[in-house]
Image: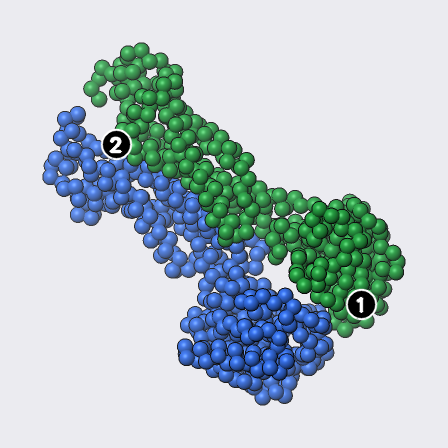
Chain colours: A green, B blue
Amino acid sequence: MDFAPILAALRRHRTATLLIALEIALACAVLCNACFLIASRIGLMQIESGVDESSLALIRLDCDDCNSSDLNARVMAALRAVPGVQSVAAVNTLPFGERAGDNGVTIDREHYVAVPHFYLGGPGAAETLGLHLAEGQPFQPEDFRTGDVWVPADTPVWISRTLADKLWPGQSALGKEFWVTDKFHFRVVGVLAHLVRPDPGGTRGSGAAEWSVFAPMAPGKVLNGTYAIRAAPADLPRVLREARDAAQKASPEAVLDLTQSRTVSDLRSDFFRPSRIMAGMLVGVIVALLLVTALGIVGLASFWVQQRRKQIGIRRAIGATRQDILRYFQTENFLIVTGGIAVGLAMAVVLNIVLMKFYELPRLPVAYLPISAVVLWLLGQLAVLGPALRAAAVPPVVATRSV
Amino acid sequence: MFSYYLDLALRSLRRNRVLTALMVLAIALGIGASMTTLTVLHVLSGDPLPGSSDTLFYPQIDPRDMDGYEPGKEPPRQVTWTDGQNLMRAKRGDRQALMTGGAVPVQPAQSGMEPFYGDARYTTADFFPMFKVPFLYGHGWSASDDESKARVVVITRTLNDKLFGGKDSTGQTLRMKDLAFQVIGVLDSWRPNPHFYDVYMGNYAAAEDVFVPLSTSRDAHFDHNGSTDCWGTGGGDQEHAETSPCVWLQFWVQLDSAAKVASYKEFLTHYSQEQKSLGRFERPPNVRLPDLMEWLDINKVVPGDVRLQTWLAFGFLLVCLVNTVGLMLAKFLRRAGELGVRRALGASKREVFSQLLVESGVIGLAGGIGGLVLAFTGLWLVRLQPSNYASLAHLDVKMLLITFLLAIGSTLLAGLLPAWRACQITPALQLKSQ
C-alpha cells in the first residue's frame, strides 16, 4: 500500500487528524496506568498467606481484668470440646485479622532496618496455622515462656523469607540475631516460605506485605483472649458457629468480638473488598474510555467519508475496487492511531513517573506498553470498519453527479 | 439574539441526533466520573471546623533520647504524660486540651441490655469550647472537675437515644467498668470530618460515645487505645503510662492571633531547652506548631486511592473533551454550506462564532445534566463501599454548581476551536460549489 496519497490527504485535515491522534495518546496513557493499577491490586489480592486459610478460624474475646491464665484454660478447653475442632492454639492475631503489633527491628541496635509484624503463638500454634518451615527447626517446649509486657527478653523466632532477604540480603538468616529497642533480643531459628502481614499492602506498603516474625510464647498475661481453631474446611462454618457460642459461654465476663471471630477466608475477603471495588471502578473507567474513544473515531471517520463521497466516486469510476477504498480508510486509521500511540506511550511513562512520585507506585513494566498499543490498534480498526464499509459501498456513478 | 441562536442550536442538534447523542454521552461520562471522585475528595479533604480551624494548633516537641537522632527529623506526633501536664499547667494558649482515646465497658442499668464496649475520649475541660462541640442537654465539665478526678461523663446523642430513650439524661447515673458516673452533658449530633483531633482512631471515624475527664480515666484504670510510641526503657505498660518514656497523648492549643502563635512557638523552644537542662530531654530543641489543616496534610489523612481515582477521572474527562472537540469540528464543518449562506447574507464572523458557541453550550448543559445523574449513581455506589468514609459521600449545593460550571465551561472550551475553524469558511467558495 502506498502511504503517500494518504499522508497528503491527512495533511489537508490536520486539525481533525491531530485530534484523533491526541485522543488516542491520552487514552493510551490512561489505559497503561489504569491496567497497571488493576494488575497490582489483583496481584496483591492473590498473595499467599502462608497459613491454611480454608481450615482456620479466629476467636477473639475482649476482657478487662480477666484472670488471663484462667480465661485461657477455660476457653481453650471449651473450644477443644466443640465437635470437629482439630486443634486450638493461643495466638495474638492471624493473617487478615486485626494488626497486633509492628515493631522496628535493628541488627546493630542503632539503625532500623525494617518494621515487620510480630505474630505470637502458643504451643501448637505453628501446627494449627499450618506454617511451612523452609529452613531451620521447630520450637522446643522450653521456648514457650510468658512475659510481663511483651515477649521474653530473649526469644528464638521464625521469620518470613522476604524479611530474611531484607535483613540479610544474600545470606542465610539461620542463627542470625536482631533487636527491638535494646531490650528485646531475637535469634532466627527458622525461615518460613511465606507468612503475610495481617494487612498486606496496608500501612506499610506492598513491598512489606510479607514482613512477618513468628515468635513462640506461653499463653498468659500478654497472650490471652485470641485463639486460632482448625477444622476440616467443609466443617468450618458450623464449627465456628459452635465455637463462638462455646467461647462466650465459657467466659461470661468477656465480650466476644464478632467482627474478628470469623474464618480466615472471610477475613481475607473483607480485607480485600476495597481493593476489589477499586479494581472494579478502574475497569469501569477503562471500558468507558475505550467506548468514548471508539465512538469518537466512528464520528470523525463518518464525517470524512461523507465529505469525500465525490472523490471516492471518482476513484471508483477510474478503476479502484471496493477493496481499495476499504483499505484506504483502514490504512489511514492505522497511521493516525500509530501516531497517537507513539505519543501516548511517552505520556504513559511520564504519568507513571508522576504517580510514582506521589503514591509510592512501582515502575510501569515495559510489557504494558506493547499490549495497550495492540489494544488501541484493534480498537481503531474496529471503529473505522463501519464508516470504511460505507465508503466502499459508494457507487462510481456518484462521480458523474454534482452533489 | 440569544434565543434565536438557541433555536438554531436546537434545530441543528435535532438534525443529527446520533452525533449529538455521542457528544452529550461523552461529556456526561467524563463529568460523571470526575464529579464522583471530586466530591469524595472534597468531602474527605474538607475543613472539620470551618471558621476556627486556623486558630487551632498541634504542638510537637521532641522528648526522645539520642538513639537514632537525625537533625531536622519530625518530632513525635504525640506527647508524653509529663509534657502534656506541663504544657497544660503553663496555660500559654487561649485554650488547651490534652487527650487520648480508649474503650470502656458500658453497663446499662436497663435489664435486657447486654454490656458493651463504647469508644471513649479521655480529655480535659477545654475540649468542648475549643472544638465548638454542640450540646443538646447539659454542658461539659470544668477545670476543677479535672483536678478532682470527678466521676462525670458526657455522652453522645446516639448513646443517649440508646440508653435513655433520647430524654434529657443529665443527672442520671451511667455505670462503666463497675464504677458509677454522673451524666452531665449530652452532645448534639457532632461528627467532625476528618476525625482530626486523634488520627490514630481512624481518619474518618465517628465521634466517640463517651467523654470522660482524662484524670478520672487514669484513676479508674480505663484502657487506652491508639498509638503508643516508646523509646529507651519504655515498655508501653498501661499501668505506668504516666512515668514511662512513651508518647500516647494528643495536645491541642487554641491561639487567637499571629503574635500568640509566634510567642507560643518560642515558648515551646524555651520549654525544650529547660527540659534539656533538667536532663529530661536529650535532643536539641526541635519544635513544630502546625495548624489544624497543616496537621491533616502531615498525616496524609486523605486516602491515596481517592486522589489517584480523581487523577484518573480527570484524565478520562480530558479524553472525553478531546473527543467532543473532534465531533464538534466534524459537525460544524459539515454545515459549511449553511454557514456560508449566513455569512453571505451579512452575519459577521463574530456572530457566526457566538452562534456556534451557544450550540456547544447547549451540548454542555445536556452533558452536565447527564453527568449529574451519573455522579449521583456513582456516589450511591461509593456509599455502598465498606470504607469508613463511604457514608460521607454526598453531593452538596456547592458541588452541584461546580458540576454545571465544569460541564458548560469545558464544553465551551471544547467548542472554541471548531467554532473558530468554522468561521474561517470563505462564503464565496461555499456558495459557488452549491
Q: Is residue B44 left or right of residue B152?
A: left
Q: Position of residue A257 (x, y in %)?
A: 71, 62
Quadrant position of residue B80: bottom right
Chain letter behind tag 1? A
Question: Could you say which disc has been placed on residue A303 in the image?
Answer: none
Q: Residue at x 28, y 24 (%)?
A: A308
Q: Is residue A335 above or below residue B235?
A: above
Of badges 2 and 1, the one in the foreground is: 1
Task: Name the amino acid type tagged 2.
Answer: Arg
Query: Distance from label 2 to label 1 (Cα)?
Result: 83 Å
Secondary structure category for the residue under label 2: helix
Residue B338 appearing in the image: no
Residue A353, horizontal then vertical, whole percent: 49, 46
Neighbours of disc 1 within 10 Å: few (<14), some (14-19), many (20+): some
Quadrant occupied by the N terminus of chain A: top left
| Residue tagged 2 | B334
| Amino acid carrying mark 1 in the image | Gly
Label of residue A147 in the image: 1
Seen at 61% across and 67% down, the residue is: B69
Local crowd size for mark 2, using a 10 Å CA cut-off: few (<14), some (14–19), many (≥20):
some
**Could you tell me which residue is drawn at 70 percent across and 53 percent down?**
A167
Image x and y of residue A240, in percent: 77, 54
- The quarter of the image holding the C terminus of chain A is top left
SS at mark 1 in the image? loop
Residue B332 seen in render: yes
User: What residue is rendered at 57% in x and 74% in y?
Assistant: B284
